[in-house]
Amino acid sequence: MTQPIPAPVLPTHGSRRPLGLGEVRITGGFWARRQQVNASATLDHCRQRMERAGWIDNFRIAASGGPLGERRRGREFSDSEVYKLLEAMVWESARTPGTPLDAAVDELADTVAAAQEADGYLNTAFGHPGRPPRYSDLEWGHELYCLGHLIQAGVAQLRTRGDGALAKAAIRAADHVCHVFGPEGGNPGLCGHPEIETALAELHRATGERRYLDQAALFVERRGHGTLAGAEFAPAYFQDDVPVRRAHTLRGHAVRALYLASGAVDVAVETGDDELLAAVVRQWEHTTARRTHLTGGMGSHHSDEGFGEDFVLPPDRAYSETCASVASLMLGWRLLLATGDPRYADLAERTLYNVIAASPADDGRSFFYANTLHQRVRATVPPSDSDSPRPAPGLRAPWYAVSCCLPNVARTLAALGGYVATADADGLQLYQYADAEITTRTPGGERVALRMRTDYPEGGTVVVTVDEAPEGRWSLALRVPGWADGAWLVVPGGQRRPVRPGMAVVPGTLRPGDEVRLELPVTPRWVHPDPRVDAVRGTVAVERGPVVYCAESPDLPDGRDVDAVTVDPSVAPRDGAGGRVVVTGELTGAHSTGWWPYLHDRPPVPAAVRTELTLVPYLSWASRGPSTMRVWLPVTPGAAGEPDPAPEG
Amino acid sequence: MTQPIPAPVLPTHGSRRPLGLGEVRITGGFWARRQQVNASATLDHCRQRMERAGWIDNFRIAASGGPLGERRRGREFSDSEVYKLLEAMVWESARTPGTPLDAAVDELADTVAAAQEADGYLNTAFGHPGRPPRYSDLEWGHELYCLGHLIQAGVAQLRTRGDGALAKAAIRAADHVCHVFGPEGGNPGLCGHPEIETALAELHRATGERRYLDQAALFVERRGHGTLAGAEFAPAYFQDDVPVRRAHTLRGHAVRALYLASGAVDVAVETGDDELLAAVVRQWEHTTARRTHLTGGMGSHHSDEGFGEDFVLPPDRAYSETCASVASLMLGWRLLLATGDPRYADLAERTLYNVIAASPADDGRSFFYANTLHQRVRATVPPSDSDSPRPAPGLRAPWYAVSCCLPNVARTLAALGGYVATADADGLQLYQYADAEITTRTPGGERVALRMRTDYPEGGTVVVTVDEAPEGRWSLALRVPGWADGAWLVVPGGQRRPVRPGMAVVPGTLRPGDEVRLELPVTPRWVHPDPRVDAVRGTVAVERGPVVYCAESPDLPDGRDVDAVTVDPSVAPRDGAGGRVVVTGELTGAHSTGWWPYLHDRPPVPAAVRTELTLVPYLSWASRGPSTMRVWLPVTPGAAGEPDPAPEG
């Protein structure tokens, strides 16, 4: 059993140990602002909307013994949203101790726990009078999924406070699950939505109880044998087509796939199952290279919220569910801890800035469920007191009938300090950059204290000051992102060395007072897609540091829409005012529209005006009211200097 | 009340009168083969699968008074599939009289009619013990939709046989609908799935009963006021966001939109409502120019089976439901009859050859539900005795849990003679080309008899021989398709005149023995997309006559997949053997795959081999087992002679 370090993931083995929330405090800048809004607005907003939706009353009715029956409100998985909110509140309460949040956690946790039954079962949609029986719909019922989120909230409480109503409820729930679904339990089933796997493995880590890990492993192994198939959904939707250790890619419903893979990594790490770990690494590599949007978003189908086939990544139909980005972060962090490979942090950074930060509004009280990369028509403003349809593209909505995403983002932001840095026997590794104070101890018990100062991602300079350091040898390594061609490391004494993408290890051993500076080139740059991504052929995008940019209609003259824009990638993009980027391109006139859009003659190119165009960070789009937006910008026909690509030798 | 001409659509007003099945007999060639397979295999296949699925037993149980309750099988709209099959059988029985089909129609019609209740209501999913009450779920219940298909089958029987059990059941059903949903009926609702509108208008045409038309008009006007909204579907899904006469485009669920528009045209024509007709014309024009796939297929979303926004037409996620193509044919034919505009027949021809003929297998016993334009992975063979998931891309499946498409194609093929030619006061107009015998009478009662001979679409020559002709002035006009640049008309006496797309009117008055020859240029040609269709930027397609071509993996060397193909549009495509087309292009080697697919440097172009490539008609794809396929082919990078498009002046 490991020490109760307040970290969202805490393997007992692996290449790196994560630094917990107590060890990494984000003190300012981009992410501190978002953590502050999360704490002051989003948690409250979620609580209010869940009360209004009746999702918390479901627990109250269940606890009172009143018949739930028709009175139960919300979808079959609404319990899990309350658990995710609780988990977020627990992390936030650990991040900023001494606030009224502690009492709020206890009150809501008591409400939930009061509905738990004597044998540990807890669900408001099943197993009550007037409701379907327990485990009568494993494909769609989400019962184990919900218990998994309860257990994750309990794990958070175990790691931050050591005990509490959530922790107790989690342990009772886990015991119940092992009892029913264990080798002697008699129920050989598995849940349509993975989540219980990682939850049980984490509870094993938090309690030392081996049964939980065994049960997690059993659930991982049970999947992939075609047990699950509902209505028009094939087993692949549930990742039930191929066993985890044999699959070559993530597939099916994106959140399901990523949660399952996270649980599989947890099991692999705890049991030393290198084959299983290698299988997930292989799936991550395939998926990242072929099934991931530029923003890091995953999932290209609206119809099944799923991964498409390789290279099916249409910007205008990108689903890129916010929850899938949270799940991607969960998976990547587990793989990083297991392997030490900084590529996982590259994708995590991209996902954080371009999906997780893009989904909630600045005020933390509305959000995107799906994160399109191309908005063709201006949205109509959703009424603030109604639930929006999920894809509701074009404007962040206060709430959806399915509102899994906002509490998922909330628990991630509250725990974000836990995704910044790791330690190993040699020293510390920094993966994400923010104003932060890092204080930890070496395995030998010596204190290390660092301060990070940066205006990243606007600026590319990260200054790390050593305040305390061990006596002996220890090392500090900083991640150089994959996009950072031409990065420099300035070591104590002022020597400037070029560093390549990967981990830049500071040479020698740092002493108190030493300063290290990482200089990342955040000048804007063109990005070209793999030619196999058919949907973006003939287009380019712009990035600046980790931030993806987009053209948005409010920045175009005369009320024009973004589909009038083409760009000339032979002219380098440059910084504009206020975090914007300026590119050169054309604004085209109206296309002539015949009655049929496919013609023998090449279509005439409308007259166009060469001009400079302002791009804004994708994460901020739709903040100025209804707009049109696109990330991938068509190349101006015959753009000067646009070279024909030369065939390879 | 019009004469009982056996035509699928029979307006009492309009620009053109359709020639019915008794007037146009398709005697050979492409469509005669499909009609023969339809008659000999598809009808039987549908009947067998519907029996096995229990959809016909539902009627038997209902008729016996046995409680349907849990015993009812199939989706809520399965009754309608039986009605569409019946309609197909009725048309087929009229097309080829004297077969055992007559008796089969009576037997199945009696089974259905026996379940009709005393007041005319008929539905096996609602209004029975253990089933939800009548009209308790107008959004999703499909009760009026089902009655609409019953009425259409009844109309077919009225027009072909004059009477029968179906005709009687239809009239009783229509009376019931008018009673419940009429101005004094008290139920102000409308059905989530349009269909009742066109059915009632057609029954008015077939019976002269004005109430049916008034009720159809009432249903058309009731839509568009936000009454319908189910779960996560916005009113636009149901076309309930904007009244028909105010909408500018088809939108939402494609089949719903097209059926509604068909009903609106019927109402507009019968009531002389020019504003309503103009509204549908406007919607058709917008939809055709911006929301239609190259194949004529409509619908680009899998998630809601719906139209996407303008120019959202991804080939690899094309939904292009087969039923939407049938519905498009229904709408276009109505608009053609109303206006005489041959563009509707252009789209109809494209849709017939590239969706309606593409969906069923050669043997008529399996079919595509959705019709993708790009198959990226080889399908796995569906088991022949199971129901496939709807999108099931890659191979035609024998049956689906929702199998609306095959009976819809069956009724269309059986009635296809009714979509070939029209008459007006001046003479005859031919729109579709096939070996056919056409016999009709002028308004003055004089006989006209023509023979069409052609090997279209393989060849482009259509010979029309006049066998009988009126004494006085009459005219013959032939459609020159929009793609037919360089067509010729050879008039009696041998004079050869160039004719432009549109209607080519034969000059003078034809006499018995005269021969007219239309020569359409069916040499293969490149087709370029409107640049606003983002998903196919940088690609071209090939057509030959009305037939869309595709690259398919069985025609590539070494087991290569179609994503290795690029083409050089500066080299004209040419005819190959066996109806194939040969283009020049490249087969590229393997792309290098890094861990991240979006890079600052332009991706290297893999080594490629210049080669000739064989394309096959899209309608025949997936006939040789699992394959990969694409219609839109990327242009070879730097293809010789590929000109930069010159800006317009």
Image: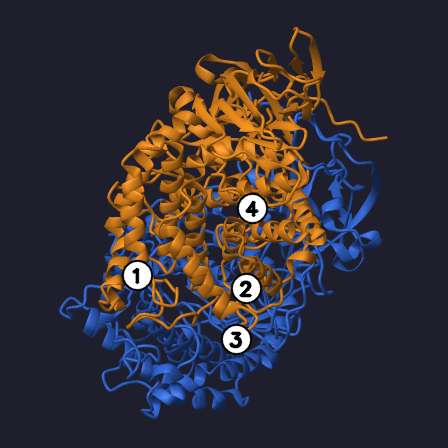
Chain colours: A orange, B blue
The residue pinned by badge 1 equals A115
Q: Which sits in the foreground, B612 or B158?
A: B612
SS for dot 3: loop
The residue pinned by badge 3 equals A186
Q: Which sits in the foreground, B368 or A391?
A: A391
Q: What residue type is labelled 2?
A: Tyr
Q: Which amino acid does label 4 sit on?
A: Pro
SS for dot 2: loop
- Establish if A450 lies above or below A394: above
The residue pinned by badge 2 equals B369
Q: Are marks 4 and 2 on the same chain?
A: yes
- Establish if A207 lies above or below A472: below
Q: Distance between the residues labelled 3 and 2?
A: 41 Å
Q: Position of residue B101 (x, y in %)?
A: 52, 87
| Numbered badge on residue B545 | none
Q: Which chain carries label 3?
A: A
Can residue B280 be seen from the camera position used here?
A: no
Q: Which amino acid does label 1 sit on?
A: Ala
| Numbered badge on residue B314 | 4
Q: Mark 2 lies on which chain?
A: B
Q: Distance between the residues labelled 3 and 4?
A: 47 Å
Q: Considering only order in the chain, which callout, 2 or 4, is on the residue closer to the N terminus?
A: 4
The residue located at (24%, 69%) in the rendering is A67
The residue located at (50%, 35%) in the rendering is A20
Q: Determine whether, in the image, residue A153 is placed left or right of residue A269.
A: left
The residue located at (65%, 61%) in the rendering is A243
